Amino acid sequence: MGSNRIAIDVEKVFNELDDHITRTNTKTGMKCTSLCNFCCSTTNIEASPIEFIPLAAWLYENGKVDDFLLRLDKSEKTGHCPLYLPEAWKEGKGGCLHYEKRGLVCRLFGFGYRHDREGIAGLVTCKEMKQTIPVAVNRAQRLGIEKPDSIPVFRNYSMQLFTIDPELALQQLPINKAIRIAIEKLYFQYAADVEDCETGENE
C-alpha cells in the first residue's frame, strides 16, 4: 500500500511542533507529571479530522481498522477519546494507546499559546502543572510576553494544517467524531489499494 500524502504532510508539521515544544520546554522547565493523563480524561475534547489522518493511515496500513472501530464505538458511548487508557498508569505506562499518532490538540495542550484580543500570547496549560511546577509555568507565561515569536502558538500550527487540507482542518468536532471522519476519509484510497494488490496476486 502506498503512503498517504496528507498523513506524511501532517506528520511533518507534528515533527516540527514537537521540536518547537522541546526547545521551549528546555527554556522554561515545563513538563508533564510522570504518567499523568488528566487532560485525556475529559469528555469535551474537540479536534479537527486532519489531526488524525496519520492515525487513520497507520490503522489501515497495519490492518487495525476493524478492531479500532469497535473501540471507537464503545468510546462514543462514554464521550472519552478512543485512544484514552485510564488504567495505564498502574502498569507504569502513559494514557494514550497510540501516543505517537496523537492529534494537534494533544500535543499543544499544556505547552501551547493562544493570543487574546489585544494580541498578547497566553499559555494554555493545566491545573496539574500550575500546582506541581508553578515556577516553570510562570517562566513560560513570561516567555510568551517577552519573546512571542519563539513560542508554539495554536493558530500558527492550525494554519499549517489548513494549507494541507482546508476542509479537514476547518472542522472542530468532538474528538471521537473527528477520528471517525479521518478513518472514513481514507477508506476508498486504502480499499482501492487492497483491491489492486488482490488483483495483482490473481493474475
Image (cartoon, rainbow, N blue to C red):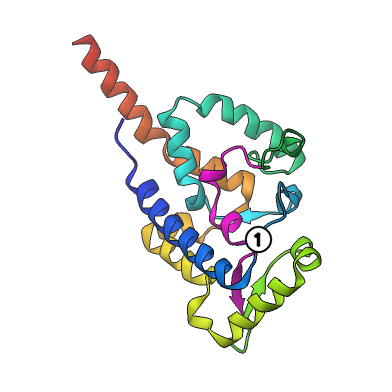
Residue, far bottom: 118
Residue underneath mark 1: 31
Q: Is residue 68 magenta?
A: no
Q: Is residue 7 left or right of residue 183?
A: left
Q: Residue at x 48, y 32 (%)?
A: 59
| Residue 168 vertical position relative to residue 53 in the rendered view, above or below | below
| Residue 103 vertical position relative to residue 30 in the rendered view, above or below | above
Where's residue 146, x and y in %?
Answer: 57, 87
Q: Residue at x 39, y 47 (%)?
A: 7
Residue, far right: 131
Q: In terms of depth relative to the viewer, which is nearer, 123 or 133? A: 133
Q: Residue 99 appears in which quarter of the rendering? A: top right
Label 1: how many Cα within 10 Å (few below 14, some 14–19, many 20+): some
Q: Is residue 141 left or right of residue 187?
A: right
Q: Is residue 5 left or right of residue 63?
A: left
Q: Residue at x 72, y 55 (%)?
A: 33
- The quarter of the image holding the N terminus is top left
- The quarter of the image holding the C terminus is top left
Q: What amino acid does circle 1 point to? A: Lys
Q: Is residue 200 left or right of residue 97?
A: left
The magenta span reads 95-115
Where's residue 185, x and y in %?
Answer: 44, 42
| Residue 198 vertical position relative to residue 36 in the rendered view, above or below | above
Q: Secondary structure beneath disc 1?
A: loop
Q: In terms of depth relative to the viewer, which is nearer, 59 or 139? A: 139
Residue 172 in sight: no
Residue 125 in sight: yes
Where's residue 57, x and y in %?
Answer: 43, 38
Q: Residue at x 78, y 61 (%)?
A: 128
Q: Is residue 101 magenta?
A: yes
Residue, far top: 202
